[in-house]
Image (cartoon, helix red, strand yellow):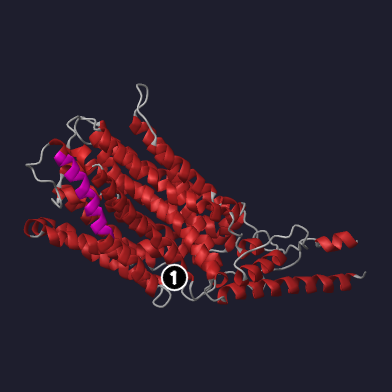
């Protein structure tokens, strides 16, 4: 066979593979919303529901643990910090680790692994005990750290899977629907807390000991029930198909990806035929050198910088407040038990008020914010929503911080309203968009890694905020006032980092990646299986 003829065959194969890749991507990008998309949304959403429940249930449970384990009826500053910061530290590690692994070994192979870690660690917390050689606080810190690793893995995996399966015109809404489950997780944690406390009302009120077993049972039930939705969703996570973009661009198996697209868009299922022809294309491969070359270009590097810092600035406030709702409520006297109540009656009323207070904050601000974003993200755009959110949060925190003394003196209700408004614009703003934008801002081979880096930087902000709260919370109103002023500054910096980001609304993931798609497939990596058999 002449070199000219071989070259023509090679070009024909190359053109065929490139054509099939474009056709498959176009099918995904233009697909109508169907039951498979609903399945992806539910399977990924349950993970975020579980994540949020487990993360924010500790806001309620820590008060109960303090009541049962400390003679002062509360945890020490270091104990409270250890329990609350362990999960964000683990989450940071999990986001980096699973983000990288999902790009190396595949989204499907890692999806479900992180959920198993969450389930085991959550159940272990509920049955943790105290012994002479080890404190229950130390045991809880360890398990919450491991749970955090699993939760961290859920961020890049769920974001990238929902992004790569979604059509161009519904990608923002699908990812927002997945992420909005976080609000329902927080809401459910407060509801479960209130139900459990009410169920043990008589036992708590009649308890006079410093180690009431009824309160101990309450926090174990609240934490342990967080494993239930994860168990339900585990099977579906383990059986979800690999995304066609990973199969095409990283495994470089165009034939299998095209087949997957045809099946899951029509039947909602997928089939892998081990005897099918495997014809691998030559495409850019992930490597340290390629990573540096790609992100060293300002047009790409500024996006990673923008997504990472925006998430960092947002989480300073989001987790700084979210993990300390009970402190905020107590500081402004919202729902505090009457001073005339003694012992068990005061304990019961305090625990119930914390649950109800968190319930009100979720309904009044958090959940509506998610759905405001849901309805507007694919029409208004990601970048405008994030800019608006950071701007509104800057204004709100300036008012709450610099006007703290006046507002809380004359109307604590006004302070609660502003606090709920801040929750609303966190979710109708950067809390949602910082999750959505990096899920589609990077090429397939670095999409999960880029999202993991961005999310991990956000968790660094959560850790910084939590440590700051721990050091200052005993200073009462002065602490709240100054921390809100600091939050205002970070929200302002978030406005500027958002300017680094592109608008990804209505654009294909390949277009956003800033790579030449016409020459993305530039050859065939070796002969196909059929060619080997007949040679």
Secondary structure mainly formed by the magenta segment = helix
Give the magenta range. Answer: 345-362
Q: Position of residue 414 (x, y in %)?
A: 14, 62
Q: Residue furthest top?
A: 132
Residue 55 horizontal side relative to residue 259, left or right: left
Q: Is residue 235 visible?
A: yes
Between residue 22 and residue 259, name the one nearer to us: 259
Crowding at mark 1 (Cα within 10 Å: few <14, some 14-19, many 20+): many
Residue 288 horizontal side relative to residue 138, left or right: right
| Residue appearing at x 47%, y 61% in the figure | 42
* Residue 228 to residue 290: above or below: above
Q: Position of residue 477 (x, y in %)?
A: 14, 49
* Residue 380 to residue 219: above or below: below
Q: Which residue is mark 1?
A: 173
Residue 356 is inside the magenta segment: yes
Between residue 317 and residue 327, name the one nearer to us: 327
Which quadrant holds the N terminus? bottom right
| Residue appearing at x 49%, y 44% in the figure | 117
Q: Position of residue 456 (x, y in %)?
A: 43, 51
Q: Position of residue 256 (x, y in %)?
A: 70, 64
Residue 418 is inside the magenta segment: no
Which quadrant holds the C terminus? bottom right
| Residue appearing at x 56%, y 74% in the figure | 29
């Amino acid at each position: 066979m002449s070199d000219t003829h071989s070259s023509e065959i090679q070009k024909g194969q190359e053109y065929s593979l490139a054509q099939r890749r474009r056709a498959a991507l176009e099918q995904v990008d233009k697909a109508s919303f169907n039951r498979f998309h609903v399945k992806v949304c539910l399977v990924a959403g349950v993970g975020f529901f579980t994540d949020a429940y487990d993360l924010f249930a500790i806001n309620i449970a820590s008060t109960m643990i303090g009541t049962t384990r400390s003679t002062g009826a509360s945890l020490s500053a270091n104990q409270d910090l250890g329990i609350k910061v362990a999960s964000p530290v683990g989450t940071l590690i999990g986001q980096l680790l699973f983000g990288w692994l999902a790009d190396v070994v595949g989204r499907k192979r890692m999806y479900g692994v992180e959920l198993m870690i969450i389930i085991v660690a959550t159940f272990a917390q509920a049955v943790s005990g105290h012994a002479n050689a080890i404190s229950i606080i130390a045991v809880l810190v360890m398990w919450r750290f491991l749970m955090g690793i699993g939760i961290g893995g859920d961020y890049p995996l769920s974001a990238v899977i929902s992004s790569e399966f979604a059509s161009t015109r519904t990608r923002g809404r699908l990812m927002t629907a997945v992420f909005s489950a976080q609000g329902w997780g927080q809401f459910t944690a407060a509801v479960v807390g209130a139900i459990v406390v009410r169920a043990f009302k008589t036992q708590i009120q009649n308890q006079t000991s410093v180690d009431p077993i009824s309160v101990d049972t309450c926090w174990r039930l609240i934490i342990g029930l967080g494993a239930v939705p994860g168990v339900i969703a585990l099977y579906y996570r383990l059986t979800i198909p690999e995304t066609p973009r990973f199969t095409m661009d990283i495994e470089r198996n165009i034939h299998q990806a095209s087949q997957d697209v045809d099946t899951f868009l029509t039947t909602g299922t997928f089939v892998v035929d081990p005897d099918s022809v495997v014809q691998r294309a030559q495409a850019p491969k992930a490597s340290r050198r390629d990573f540096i070359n790609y992100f060293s270009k300002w047009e790409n590097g500024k996006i990673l910088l923008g997504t990472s810092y925006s998430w960092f600035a947002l989480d300073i406030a989001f987790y700084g407040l979210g993990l300390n709702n009970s402190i905020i409520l107590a500081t402004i006297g919202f729902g505090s038990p009457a001073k005339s109540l003694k012992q068990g009656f005061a304990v019961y009323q305090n625990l119930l008020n914390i649950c109800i207070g968190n319930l009100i904050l979720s309904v009044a601000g958090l959940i509506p914010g998610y759905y405001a974003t849901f309805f507007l993200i694919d029409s208004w755009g990601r970048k405008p929503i994030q800019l608006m959110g950071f701007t509104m949060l800057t204004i709100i925190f300036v008012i709450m911080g610099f006007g703290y003394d006046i507002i809380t003196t004359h109307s604590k209700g006004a302070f609660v309203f502003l606090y709920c408004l801040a929750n609303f614009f966190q979710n109708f703003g950067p809390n949602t968009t910082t999750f959505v934008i990096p899920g589609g801002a990077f090429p397939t081979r670095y999409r999960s890694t880029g999202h993991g880096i961005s999310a991990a930087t956000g968790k660094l902000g959560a850790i910084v905020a939590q440590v700051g709260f721990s050091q200052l919370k005993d200073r009462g109103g002065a602490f709240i006032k100054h921390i809100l002023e600091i939050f205002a500054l970070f929200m302002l910096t978030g406005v500027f980092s958002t300017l680094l980001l592109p608008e990804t609304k209505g654009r294909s993931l390949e277009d956003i990646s800033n790579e030449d798609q016409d020459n993305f497939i530039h050859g065939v990596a070796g002969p196909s299986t059929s060619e080997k058999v007949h040679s």
